[in-house]
Image: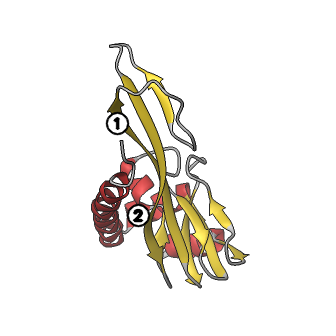
Amino acid sequence: MDQLVKLAYTMTRQVYTEGSVIRQQGERFDHFILLDKGELLVRQTIATALTSTIDSEISGSIIIQKSKNGKRYKHCPIEVEIAELKHYDLFGAVEYVSKTKKYRRQLIAKTAAEVYFIPITVMDSFLKQEPKTAKMVYELARRRIKWEEVRRDFGESFCID
């Protein structure tokens, strides 16, 4: 129970307007984010690599690079909407379980939203003291990772050679 009280006291509340970027992909992973009100959109920028023999100039955001083996690759960055979060959804579970130091996805307020930030160190301590809750967070992350793979595979299909 002491861990829950500590968790509650360390949470900070923040309100965002529709369209606000709450976390950027690649930013340092330092907090879990708990959604209290509104809706959030989870988006990820992926870069596909397609083998190409084209030497001509490519327009837009497609980049051509030459690899060590002499083959040319087109990198096609695509933004993929991974998920929509609603009341009491938790953002950061994937990063926590994957033990990454940076957010793997971008978090945007789809509507006006109220969120609570929970420091990783406090959440980590809490989860170590509450194995049932830790199990739920790991299961949540497992499901999200699987869903993200499906969404990324789908998104990659839109980068045409």
Q: Who is closer to the viewer here, 126 or 105?
A: 105
Does residue 73 appear in this view? Answer: yes
Q: Name the quadrant of the C terminus.
A: top left
Q: Is residue 153 above or below residue 38?
A: above
Q: Who is closer to the viewer here, 5 or 77?
A: 77
Q: Is residue 13 above or below residue 144?
A: below
Q: Which mark is residue 50?
A: 1
Instruction: Tell me the quarter of the picture where residue 151 sits.
Output: bottom left
Q: Who is closer to the viewer here, 127 or 45?
A: 45
Which SS class for mark 2?
helix
> Residue at image x 48%, y 76%?
85
Amino acid type for the residue under numbered disc 1: Leu
Q: Who is closer to the viewer here, 51 or 93?
A: 51
Report the residue marked by disc 2. Answer: 127
- The residue mark sitting in front, 1 or 2, is 1
**x then y, percent, for residue 5:** 56, 76
* Number of residues whose C-alpha sits closer than 10 Å to that of mark 1, classed few (under 14), some (14–19) or many (20 or more): some
> Residue at image x 35%, y 72%?
133
> Residue at image x 71%, y 75%?
16
Which SS class for mark 1?
strand
Label 1 – label 2 distance at C-alpha = 41 Å
Q: Is residue 119 above or below residue 104?
A: below
* In this picture, residue 136 sits left or right of residue 86: left
**x then y, percent, for residue 131:** 31, 67
